[in-house]
Image: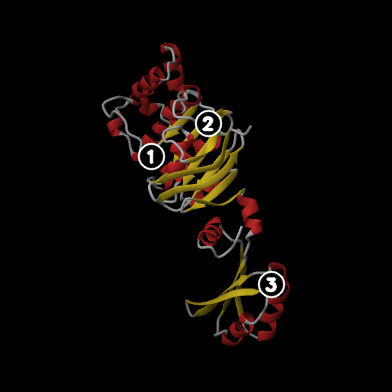
Amino acid sequence: MPAIKCVELTKRYGALTALDGLTIEVHERSIFGFLGPNGSGKTTMIKLLMGMSRPSAGRAWVNEKEVVADAPDMRAQIGYLPDVPNFYNWMTGNEFLQFIGELCHLSSFDSVSRSYELLELTGLQKAGKRKIGGYSRGMKQRLGLAQALMNHPKVLFLDEPCSALDPMGRRDVLNIILKLREFTTVFMSTHILSDVERVCDSLAIINKGKLVTTSTVEALRQRFALSSFDIEFDSDPAELTILLENQPWVQKVTKLESNNTSVLCVLAGDVQSAKRELPQLIAASGLSLVRYEMTMPSLEDIFVRLVAGEVRT
């Protein structure tokens, strides 16, 4: 069985359906991105998979063990980092991790050894002797990752691990997450699309509690690719704009003005036809070309179109 599997997982709160029949599989030793807008059901899903909440319908398995309300064996093999972790600020980082080790039933020797190992992994060796109250937000997030790894989990659940971090802090945390696939499976919920592009092997997109799609990032791009061509001229391309809007391979043409030049952003539904015919149309227009650039769609572009229902899976 995969590291995580759920079948028709559903959670209702009275008349509200927070999750609606999700069926997902996550491979071992991979980083899985669970992607959706705020309020789409991401945290609810993590709580169900960890046995912190009971499903209204459906079943789930983690590490080949079915998730039920009382499952100490399953919980002993998972780690969890909430979106806003809390600490005892009067403790040092080292003391806190050793305390977590005791909660995980590690011996005193193993708690000390594991704490130093994780402080090194998270880049907190020097900060380990300092009180947590003096840590920055990024340092606290890295310490939260360390505590979630204290029990050598086979599956690690991360709930919005980078949402409150600045660019430097996000980079540090993502670099650590990239290393984790060597020894654990990571299930990471987030709404930050660039983070998914950077670290995830595969992903699921949900919206309003419903599964939109599951895929790898690259497969998603190939399936829903709509390449854009940015064409800049030093004069008004009004006639060319009308001509392009009538081409069958063009989905949309947007005109922008920039520094005494005009830029046409051409969204192509048929990329091969655009590559072949667009240069010919530009040459025939007699316009003086300043810039011609093709850009591939970002995950953000695809995500917005999927959530908005502009394309179907």
Residue type, numbered disc 2: Val
- In the rendered structure, are the residues bearing label 3 and label 2 in contact, judged by CB atoms less than 8 Å apart? no
Label 2 crowd (10 A; few <14 / some 14-19 / many >=20)? many
Give whichever of discs 2 and 1 has the lower sequence position.
1
Residue occupied by mark 2: 155
Is residue 306 or residue 280 the one in the foreground?
306
**Residue indicated by mark 3:** 274
What x and y, as percent, mark residue 74? 50, 25
State the CA–CA distance, disc 1 to disc 3. Answer: 45 Å
Q: Amino acid at mark 1?
A: Gly
Image point (66%, 85%), residue name = 285
**Where 303 sits versus 187, above or below?**
below
SS label for mark 3: helix
C-alpha distance separating marks 3 and 2: 45 Å
Q: Mark 1 — residue? A: 138
Q: Secondary structure at mark 2?
A: strand
Q: Is residue 8 left or right of residue 101?
A: right
Q: Which mark is residue 1?
A: none
Residue 306 seen by the camera:
yes
On the question of residue 160 being in view, the answer is no
Q: Secondary structure at mark 1?
A: helix
